[in-house]
Amino acid sequence: MKSRAPLVISGDLHAVGMARIVRSGRQEFRANPVATVLSGPIGTGPSGWISAFRGTPALPPAHLDIQEDITPIEQHSFTVADFLPDKITLRFFKWDVKSDAVEKIDTLEAFRIVELPRPL
């Protein structure tokens, strides 16, 4: 739908991040890139971050061309998305569970804010 802001949100990689897909194989999306968001893990188990098990950090597939807005960060985090008629506003939050009290979550400031306007 060319009149919408294309967006995919995933929480599967236990990281927070964002990129825009500008090409997938032969498909070109430069006119209206697909925003892809890693929403962040609100918490993870005592065994650690998933990249330790995979042996590699989160990386884009070779058949995609992307513009990286936020390199994936493996840290306790979450994303708030506000869907408005003319745009989507994404606010990204993170905290250090080792040094920050859980009560700090209530007063966190977004470390990044991204607006995805609706195409004209």
Image: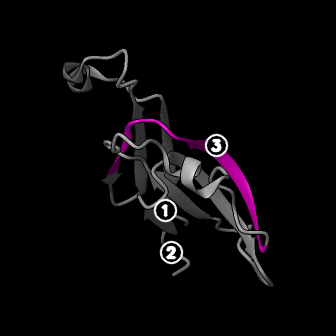
Q: Determine whether, in the image, residue 11 is placed left or right of residue 60.
A: left
Residue situated in front as seen by the camera: 7 or 16:
16
Distance of label 2 from label 3 (alpha carbons): 28 Å
Q: Secondary structure at mark 3?
A: strand
Residue identifier under label 1: 118
What type is the residue that disc 1 sits on?
Arg
- Mark 2 surroundings within 10 Å by alpha-carbon count, few (fewer than 14), some (14 through 19), many (20 or more): few
Q: Quadrant of residue 22?
A: bottom right
Query: Quick one: 73 or 25, which is closer to the camera?
Result: 73
* Local secondary structure at mark 1: loop
Residue 24 horizontal/vertical position (percent) = 73, 77
Q: Find disc 3 in the rendering and name its residue.
A: 71
Magenta region, residue range: 63-81
Q: How many marks?
A: 3
In depth, the one of 44 and 60 nearer the eye is 44
Which secondary structure type mostly characterizes the magenta part of the structure?
Answer: strand
Q: Residue at x 37, y 20 (%)?
A: 98
- Is mark 1 in CB contact (under 8 Å) with mark 2? yes
Q: CA distance from mark 1 to mark 3?
A: 24 Å
Disc assigned to residue 3: 2
